[in-house]
Image (tube, grey):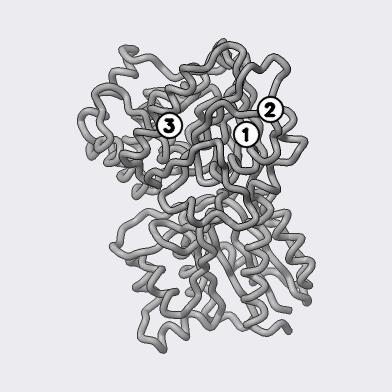
Amino acid sequence: MIPPARRNEDARAIFAAAVRAVQADHLLTPEVLETLVPGRCAAIRVIGLGKAAMAMAGVLEAELGTPIREGLVVVPHDYPSHLPDRLPAPERIAVETAGHPVPDEGSVRVGRRFRAIADSCEAEDTLVVLISGGGSALAVDVPDGVTLQHVQQTVQALLTSGAPIQAINAVRKHLSRFKGGQLARAAAPATVRALVVSDVVGDDLSTIASGPTVPDPSTYGEAIEALKQHDVWARVPATVRQHLKAGHRGAVPETPKPGTAVFDHVTTQLVGTNRHALDAAAEAARARGYEPHILDAEVTGEARAVAQSHVQTLRDDAAAGPVCGLWGGEPTVTVTGSGTGGRNQEAALAGAIALEDDERAVTLLCGGTDGIDGPTDAAGAWATPATARAARRLGLDPRAHLDNNDAYPFFEALDQLLKPGPTHTNVMDVHIGLIGG
């Protein structure tokens, strides 16, 4: 039998190994970087957007071996001060910060500079674009007639509606002048080389950071339908509705679609995914004496239902020895309460409730690989069969906290929050279930 303290430590160590495997120094290998610069290149310009952008830019500078004429990357506020020590900071490439998950004035400034860099590219230039999760909010170039405040209100309404990222980003693309392939259109006919770290289930390149370098299959009509389907159409500003309706009737140009000539000199390469993290987690679990099983790499749905499914799967496992169940993906939360938390904390809390009467030695850890879960400083939390009972002894009602979407103070009181800090990567979530034997 693995003691509870050791099992909880193992869960955290396995999660850390998953994160390390998808950080820039592991993903941007010499084999990846040598494909970036074609023989005809006159100048290299760099744009980066997303939580991994600064780390990717630092590794690119250190390893590329080719001078960079200009470059700009954007990461969330406070990220530059949390770059892991082993990762080089960029020197020639400028680093800006902006709002996430809701854009701010910094997002607009960066979005306009991105467009200017792309517009300045000559045919012989190469534009290297470093793309990772969070880019949709961090860089914004709003269309005429729509203000930043209007975009903020729209994004906030979608984020709390339970809408999947595909629906959210269909709207974001059509409230932008460089998302949805429009950055590639601005840079044409220059060569564009994009390196992508995926934070979406299925690794759809048109959804990650709203797909600035790839064709956009979504339309204005689909953006309108996404708002209506998730009951936010009537709540978004009138200017947003007017812009989307104008695009739907053809008065505003659509985003570039598959087969458009602007993509003739564009290559977009997926370099990091949730599966990379799960494989590393499995290896770390095996090294710690567990039999690992990657059970699902595309987890979606309400976080509390996902956790209940995880617990049932662990209960059904009849293996005698220590076992590690692994899941990847990105659940959602439909916010109905006024509490503080995130999807991984909510999943862990639902797991704690489901585990309360379990007699087996189980730990369920749920964490975001970016180190941040919802609007908190935690990546997630972990739960065992003792968690809910310990909370009740402190006067905390697990069900009331779950109903109020208030997982953060619940786990804070128990010292069971997962707090690695910003990791400078993002491949969605990793959930770890350990059965101690």
Earlier sequence position, callout 2 versus callout 1: 2
In the rendered view, would you say 202 is above or below 186?
below
Residue sitting at x 64%, y 70%: 11
Residue under circle 2?
Answer: 36
Viewer-nearest residue: 133 or 314: 133
- Determine whether the residue tagged by mark 2 lies in a helix, strand or loop: loop
Which amino acid type corresponds to the residue marked 3 in the rendered image? Ala
- Determine whether the residue tagged by mark 1 lies in a helix, strand or loop: strand
Residue under circle 1?
Answer: 195
Which amino acid type corresponds to the residue marked 1 in the rendered image? Leu
State the separation of the CA atoms marked 2 and 1. Answer: 9 Å
Residue sitting at x 62%, y 13%: 124
In the rendered view, would you say 12 is above or below 216?
below
Residue under circle 3?
Answer: 170
Residue 44 drawn at (x, y percent) = 60, 24
Quadrant (top left/top right/bottom left/bottom right) for the C terminus? bottom right
Viewer-nearest residue: 85 or 322: 85
State the separation of the CA atoms marked 3 and 1. Answer: 21 Å
